[in-house]
Every structure is written in C-alpha cells, then in structure tokens.
C-alpha cells in the first residue's frame, strides 16, 4: 500500500510513528510506503487500485460521513487514466517519510 499526503495538511507527529508501527507489525507481508508531496499540490481524495481503478471520496477519511452523508464513486476509465498518470508523477517527486 502507498499513501501520499501533502506537507501542509498531514500530521507528521502522528503519521511517522503510525507508519513505523505498521511496518513493525506487518513487515513485508503488508508493505506500506508513505510520501509527502509539496505543499498545496494535493486536493483530491482518491483511492487507486492496481493503477487502473480510481475512486473519489466526497470527504476526508478522518471523519468520513460524520458530519454529513458522502459518497465513494468509481471514476470512468478515461478519467482514471489521467489521474493515475498525474499522481504517479506526484509520487515520483514526493519525499519519503
């Protein structure tokens, strides 16, 4: 699993220890890689599956549907292709934590 967040909105004080706990607990059986993109480069809330299926979320995952109903919607194939390419480029330039 890979997680991409931006440097402005992530909570580094809790994110890094959480990543280390995950890696210690699961090791290579459930690998996790986390990177931080430059400030203000991310806006979408997306889930990518196998670099071909893309889902968009109506709210942040930290309190999904707590304030109001929301949706998780699979985007069409053409949009998915564009998103996969764009976020692959962001991933390549992001900084590992």
Image (cartoon, rainbow, N blue to C red):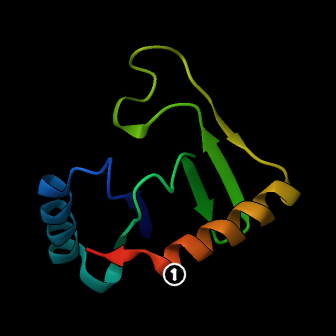
Residue 46 visible? The answer is yes
Q: Which of the pair 52/45 is nearer the observer?
A: 45
Residue 34 on image: x %, y %: 34, 70
Residue name at image x 61 percent, y 74 percent: 88
Q: Residue furthest top?
A: 68
Compared with residue 9, is residue 66 higher up or lower down, i.e. above or below?
A: above
- Residue 9 x %, y %: 32, 47
Residue 64: x %, y % from top left: 43, 29
Give 34 or 7, whichever is nearer the viewer. Answer: 7
The reply, left or right, for residue 88 in relation to residue 73 is left
At horizontal 44% and vertical 70% (from top left) the residue drawn is: 2
Quarter-of-image position of residue 7 = bottom left
Q: Which residue is mark 1?
A: 92
Please, what secondary structure does the residue beneath circle 1 have? Answer: helix
What residue is drawn where x is 22% and y is 67%? 19
Q: Residue furthest right?
A: 78
Report whether 36 appears left or right of 71. left
Residue plotted at (60% across, 67% down): 87
Is residue 30 in sight in this rendering?
no
Left or right: 41, with 5 as reference point: right
**Could you tell me residue 56's position as x and y percent?**
63, 43
Quarter of the figure with the N terminus: bottom left
Q: Quadrant of the C terminus?
A: bottom left
Q: Residues within 10 Å of mark 1 (few under 14, many from 20)?
A: few
Q: Residue furthest bottom?
A: 28
């Amino acid at each position: 699993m890979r997680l991409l967040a931006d440097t402005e909105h992530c909570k580094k004080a809790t994110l890094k220890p959480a990543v280390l706990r995950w890696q210690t607990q699961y090791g290579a059986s459930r690998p996790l890689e986390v990177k931080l993109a430059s400030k203000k480069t991310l806006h979408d809330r997306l889930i990518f599956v196998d670099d071909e299926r893309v889902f968009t979320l109506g709210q942040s995952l930290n309190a999904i549907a707590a304030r109001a109903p929301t949706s998780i919607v699979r985007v069409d194939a053409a949009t998915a292709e564009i998103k996969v390419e764009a976020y692959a480029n962001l991933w390549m330039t992001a900084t590992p934590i």
